[in-house]
Image: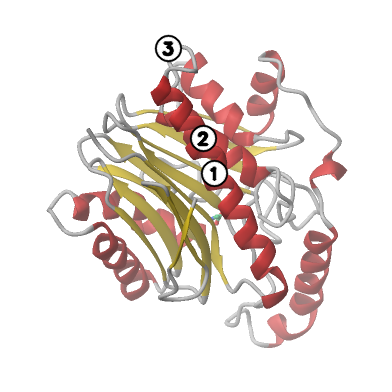
Amino acid sequence: MVEPVVVVHGGAWAVPEELWDESLQGVKAAARRGYGASIHCYCGVLTAGGSSVDAAEASVVCLEDNPVFDAGTGSVLTFDEQVEMDAIIIDGTTMEAGAVGAIRNVLNPVKVARLVMEKTDHIMLVGDGANKFAAAHGVQEVDPEVLITSLARQTLAKYKKYTSTVYHLFNKTEKPETSGHETVGCVVVDREGHTSCATSTGGITAKMPGRVGDTPIVGAGGFADDQVGAVSTTGHGEAIMKACLARHITSVMGTGESVKSSIQNGLAHMESRIKGFGGAIAVSCKGEVGTHFSTPRMTWAYIQAGKLHYGIHPNQHVTEDL
Ligand code: GLY
């Protein structure tokens, strides 16, 4: 028997002070949502088939519905002012995966990712194909405006102003620092040692239409295998894809390294080899938890053995009774 745990993150980036409190409240609520789901599964309240996957999905839906995060409602905007979202979910018991890329006009991409996992022979659907599949499975289309926050509009406007001035003067060697916001995710291990991960994002501000990042890629945005554990990553997608960050971290975990140092190893490799920055959460199949980031901040929270743990700053770890 394993002490079950639900770990969530709200993205690794330079979270500004005015968003600290809201982001922390958001990850705490998401951890509670997933943990409640997993406890219900364990107690048999849900019908057969309820699992760590239910908990991961429930937590990520909670994060997608919270406009403070760059996923679902609150997603950042493409260069042409649209919302295009990516998501993945993986069942570590079967290693089945489902993912969507550049999906539009749905509230919860992670739910569509789960449908892809369970209802198709494929792993990833993108663009119009993903939207048509979602509609065929009863997922309601929403007005794109519902997903867009004023912060997303302001961030894109700032980016465009920057690119039309400084960025070009520096021959594109300098990147604007206004493209903040990041991905959300969750990893779970239940009492039987079944693991899962889910990750969801609106991507990066001013991305090209049609750009798909790391989030829906198995081994980059997430990975889960009951023989080792589960990982969800956040950060610059192009770097995370090159580093296969989630798979890198589980490979190191598989050598017997602690979960935290496995994440540190993955992030150090990504930084030294590709100059990429980000963060990750992970849990081993035995219930050991790790969180780490190479960006200025990352909101995270987890619940295990009656305690709620959370943090946002480097080396911050607060513990409360549930
Ligand atoms: N990690 C999110 C993205 O780059 O799309």
Give 239 or 53, whichever is nearer the viewer.
Answer: 53
State the residue at coordinates (69%, 29%).
128
Q: Where is residue 177 shown, x and y percent of the image?
A: 65, 77
N-terminal label among 3 and 1? 1
Amino acid type, callout 1:
Arg
In the displayed structure, 42 sits above or below 60; it is: above
161 vs 230, left or right, is right
173 vs 97, left or right, is right
Any part of residue 14 in sight: yes
In the displayed structure, 202 sits above or below 275; it is: above
Q: Residue 36 carries which label?
A: 2
Circles 2 and 1 in contact, beta carbons < 8 Å: yes
Circle 2 crowding by C-alpha within 10 Å: few under 14, some 14–19, many from 20: some
Circle 3 crowding by C-alpha within 10 Å: few under 14, some 14–19, many from 20: few
- Residue depth check, mark 3 versus mark 2: number of the one nearer the observer: 2
Inter-mark Cα distance, 3 to 2: 16 Å
Query: Which quadrant holds residue 226?
Result: top left
Q: Which mark is residue 81?
A: none
Determine the secondary structure under disc 2: helix
Looking at the image, in which quadrant does ligand 1 appear?
Answer: bottom right
Determine the secondary structure under disc 1: helix
220 vs 9, left or right, is left
Circle 1 crowding by C-alpha within 10 Å: few under 14, some 14–19, many from 20: many
Residue at disc 3, CB closer than 8 Å to ligand 1: no
N-terminal label among 3 and 2? 2
Any part of residue 88 in sight: no
Q: Residue 48 carries which label?
A: 3
State the residue at coordinates (71%, 61%).
206
Residue at disc 1, CB closer than 8 Å to ligand 1: no
